[in-house]
Image (tube, coloured by chain):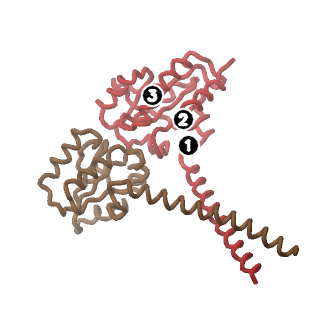
Amino acid sequence: MEKTILMSMKIKRLNVFTVFLITGILGFVLVSFKTQQKEPWNHEQLLSPEDLAKTLSDPQSHQPLILSVGPAATIKNSIDIGAAKDKANLDKLKRQLKATSKDETIVLYCGCCPFDKCPNIRPAFELLNQMQFTNHKLLNLPHNLKVDWIDHGYPVSN
Amino acid sequence: MIMAILLAIEQMKIRLLLALLLLFDVSISYSQIQGIELGNQAPEIRLPTPEGDTVSLSSFKGKLVLIDFWASWCGPCVEEQPELVRLYKKYRQVSFTNGNRLEIYGVSLDNKKAAWVNMINKKKISWSQVSDLRYWSSPVAKAYNIQELPFNLLVDGNGVVIGKNLHGIDLDDALTQSRIK
């Protein structure tokens, strides 16, 4: 009898814990799924800084068109478009890419602020989606240019 | 038999919980080991104002100084400026236990002078503003190991950091607590 009560208590405790754990995991999965859904880029379109740095230091490899859509073109060989939150700069980006082949490798970056607070990357990436480019990437700088690029000693413009 | 299975499941869950806690703990320690800490001497800063004069941090020795690292391209930094204007008016003539009067030292990570100066005028900022206009490549960002903007430090009359990343009501409270009654 005592054993049965003890067991039922244990099962109850386990059940509460299980519900808590499953809710937590489900919540996390749902939030990450939602976050991924609302961005104009997908996971495969995020380019790691390490990969771009490797490409930049290897003159033999095909060099992508690197466009800064933030305050400054800090990364080596990148073109300064200006902050893409301003319509004038977005128009400049459009003009810049007018004659570019749709399958050209294009890398966009800003790096002013963490991704969730950056006002520039979304309008720029959406424009490239609309222009039907097929090989455009967003440089994955989740914190900013300093933390994710400069502090690693990756190449910068003079 | 059932008991043994239940116990095994429970042990597994405890291990999982411990692993999760450890992961959480590691991420907290990681965020805390970065940058200048309370009690550190604030590294010297000597940079030009928009007019071209050089203003150093050490020139405010004896005063309580809020070093405000910001930029005109940083939305949250710009939004914070009216609050700093209010606090500057409120405390600039006040004597503190750890500094005589409040000074704000605005250090900008801008890279375009026009954008920087326009924002200073637009937000009616009257305290000292300096910048090397080098964006995230600024040696100041490196010396202070700045990870994100906005970022600020409260420095006492001897140049020792006594507050870090205080904003809004927290900053107001810290200043109220330090004032000589």
Q: Amino acid at mark 1?
A: Ile
Q: Quadrant of the N terminus of chain B?
A: bottom right
* Relative image position of residue A13 (x, y in whole percent): 74, 65
Instruction: Say left or right for B40 vs A30.
Output: right
The kind of secondary structure element at disc 2 is strand
**Do tag 2 and tag 3 residues touch (Cβ < 8 Å)?**
no
Residue reaching furthest to the right? A2
Residue A131: image quadrant is bottom left
N-terminal of the pair, mark 2 or mark 3, is: 3
Q: Colour of chain B?
A: red
* Relative image position of residue B53 (x, y in whole percent): 37, 24
The residue labelled by disc 1 is B36
* Relative image position of residue B101 (x, y in whole percent): 57, 19
Q: CA distance from mark 2 to mark 3?
A: 15 Å
Q: CA distance from mark 3 to mark 1?
A: 23 Å
Work out whether residue A119 or residue B58 is closer to the camera in this orientation and state it: A119
Residue B81's disc is 3
**Labels 3 and 1 positioned on one and the same chain:** yes
In the image, the chain rendered in brown is A
Q: Amino acid at mark 2?
A: Leu
